[in-house]
Image (tube, helix red, strand yellow):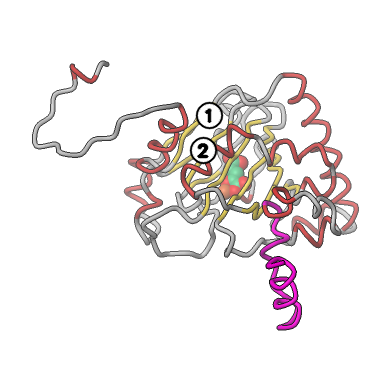
Amino acid sequence: MSTDELKSYGVRQATALQSDVDRFREEIVINGFTVVPDLVSEAELAEARKRIDAVYAEQVNEVGGEENLRKINDARVGRCLLAYDDYFLGFATNPRVHAVVASLLGEYFTILQQNAVINAPTNKHYQSAWHRDLAYQHFVSSRPLAVSALFCIDDFSEVTGGTYVLPGSHKTEPFPSPEFIKAHERTVTAKAGSALIFDSMIYHRGGVNRSTGLRRGINHLFGLPFIKQQISFPKSLGGKYKDDPALSRFLGYDTEAAESVVHWRTNRIQAAK
Ligand SMILES: O=C(O)CCC(=O)C(=O)O
Ligand SMILES: [Fe+2]
């Protein structure tokens, strides 16, 4: 529809889009979510599937078996992927996703989480419970605090269990009533290779996978740098990428809590030189 056909009155302020990024940003600000298509090629998707399964197998092994993950509701989630396999740094730093995130958070944001979500057929997956990615938070802010980017590694469809969202729920404090949820929840369907990008405060959940294959995704949580990482990337990486200024900032090296007053001051004195 051209803007000429759009009748309105009493409007003194209106949004005009200059780019795709503006369009994605507007959808996230108002609805709480958007889908960015065509981010990952078929060949990369095939590679990512194998590597997600390999990292998950390694992490199952680390804790002595999947039953231990089931005990803590953490089965079928791979955590901190890029600390296990460099390949996943490419997803975390995707420039088209970063442009959308920066339009909402500004240029300085850090990675708080990078998780593989492996939704198996008919598995009652933990993440299929409604939640905010900034869990336990019940305030709303005038600007976004964190943005999630969930890459679809397999198709997200009605059958494979696309993510459910409650549009606009990033803007109200309490979890909405069952009646509201029933009336307004919607499934987001998206082709493999796209990403569902959302305000991390929107209520959402995984769908139930009624297909015969795995439905994998890689979720990222990007946040303002004062927000704590769930698992420390700097410590998990053991100093890797620290010498690259942009990466070290993004991975949280620059915003780790200082060990002491002297450490904090020494770092600042060095930087002031
Ligand atoms: O698997 C999904 O569709 C949702 C995943 C999710 O909510 C998460 O990783 O926080
Ligand atoms: Fe989530």
Q: Is residue 137 magenta?
A: no
- Which residue is identified by label 2? 100
Q: Is residue 266 magenta?
A: yes
Above-or-below relation of 192 to 232 = above
Near mark 2 (Cα within 10 A), the count class, few <14, some 14-19 or many ≥20, is: many
- Which residue is identified by label 1? 36
* Disc 1 secondary structure class: strand
- The single residue placed furthest to the bottom in the displayed view is 261
Whether residue 128 is visible, yes or no, is no
Quadrant in the rendering for residue 219: top right
The amino acid type found where label 1 is placed reads: Val
In the image, taking residue 13 as reference, residue 109 lies left or right, namely right
Whether residue 212 is visible, yes or no, is yes
Residue nearest the viewer, comparing 18 with 238: 18
Q: Residue 167 placed where, x, y %?
A: 38, 42
The amino acid type found where label 2 is placed reads: Val
- Nearer the N terminus, badge 2 or badge 1? 1
| Residue that appears at 82% across and 45% down | 56
Above-or-below relation of 151 to 172 = above
Check mark 2 vs ligand 2: CB closer than 8 Å? yes or no. no
Q: Residue 81 placed where, x, y %?
A: 77, 46
How far apart are the alpha carbons under marks 2 and 1?
A: 9 Å
| Residue that appears at 68% across and 67% down | 272
| Residue that appears at 52% across and 28% down | 189
- The single residue placed furthest to the front in the displayed view is 273
Verify CB contact (< 8 Å) between mark 2 and mark 1: yes
